[in-house]
Image: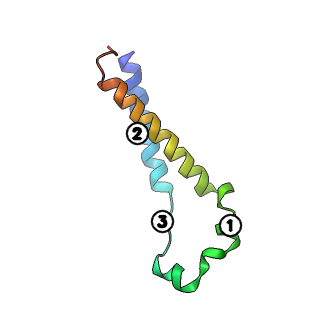
Amino acid sequence: MQTALIIALLIISVVLAIIVMMQEGKGNGLTDTLTGSTDSYWSKNKKHSKQSRLNKATAVLGALYMILALLLSSKFIK
């Protein structure tokens, strides 16, 4: 049981690292503020974008990673 959890933890950690590296930055900061480019069609429809799916996958995999790490560190799994 413990070996399977360790293998799952390793797979999740590699996939999580790849997904985090695929994500874009959060914006240009001052440039977006001065140019007012936050009210574009793209910014209004971000929930259907690839970036949105990557954010959701990061959150789910991060939660799974933490749960598996807590299970492996507990005394109940041997």
Residue indicated by mark 3: 25
Identify which amino acid the numbered label 2 is placed on: Ser
Label at residue 74: none
Secondary structure type for disc 1: helix
C-alpha span from label 2 to label 1: 32 Å
Label at residue 13: 2
Residue found 28% across the figure and 17% down from its top: 75
Residue indicated by mark 1: 44
The earlier-in-sequence mark between 2 and 3 is 2
Quarter the C terminus occupies: top left
Identify which amino acid the numbered label 3 is placed on: Gly
- Point out residue 60 in the picture as x, y percentages from the top left corner: 52, 40
Q: Look at the numbered discs 2 and 3 and tell me whether their residues touch, using CB distance below 8 Å.
A: no
Q: Is residue 67 above or below residue 30?
A: above
**Based on the displayed image, in which of its 4 quarters is residue 6 positioned?**
top left
- Point out residue 76 in the picture as x, y percentages from the top left corner: 33, 15
Q: Is residue 77 above or below residue 29?
A: above
C-alpha span from label 2 to label 3: 21 Å
